[in-house]
Image: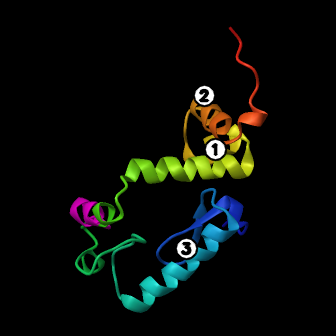
Amino acid sequence: MPTDPMESSLSASGSLIKRGVGLLVASQLRQFAKERHAQWPASPNPHLLVTTHSAHHPALPSVSYCALRRVFDQTGITPRQMWSDRVLDEARQTADPVDLVHLFGIHPGTAVRYVHTAQPDKALPRIR
């Protein structure tokens, strides 16, 4: 089992699984997992994100589409916008497309475009 948070993520049970997350994210996930366990200590649902209904039914999805849609409607952003913002923020921090490919599972060309957008001063000149 990995112990480096940069190479790990957290399951609902609090155990680390192989995945790339940063120190801050790993810390926040641990705290959220503790709160989830305190709220539903006997929950058979293995997902980290659950609702009051899905926490007690392991066959249900972690959070329904309607529950997520309601949260995003209240924020005024879409899940895609949130994801893109997360990738762009990571590109600002690392400036390494390879890190983005490993962390988000995106195509290398997409990762390079995110880095060029986040850090135009580090972009290579276009060939054409």
Q: CA distance from mark 1 to mark 3?
A: 20 Å
In the rendered image, residue 68 lying in the magenta stretch gets the answer: yes
Q: Earlier in the sequence, mark 2 or mark 1?
A: 1
Which residues lie in the magenta part? 61-70
Please give the name of the residue rendered at 33% of the width and 79% of the height, measured from the top-left corner: 44
Upstream in the sequence, badge 2 or badge 3? 3
Check disc 3 and report its element: helix, strand or loop.
helix
Q: Could you tell me residue 116's position as x and y percent? A: 67, 34
* In-image side of 55 versus 88 (left or right): left
Q: Residue at x 71, y 35 (%)?
A: 120
Local secondary structure at mark 1:
helix
- Using the image, tell me which numbered label, if any, was put on residue 109: 2
Q: In the picture shown, does residue 35 fall above or below 93? A: below
Residue under label 3:
29
Numbered mark located on residue 100 in the image? 1
SS at mark 2?
helix
- Say what amino acid the circle numbered 3 marks: Leu
Q: Amino acid at mark 1?
A: Leu
Proximity of marks 2 and 1: CB atoms separated by less than 8 Å:
no
Query: Where does the image place residue 98, in percent across and percent down from the top left?
Result: 70, 39
Examine the rendering and report whether any part of residue 43 can be seen: yes
Q: Nearer the viewer, residue 95 or 62?
A: 95
**Distance (Cα) linking label 2 and label 1:** 11 Å
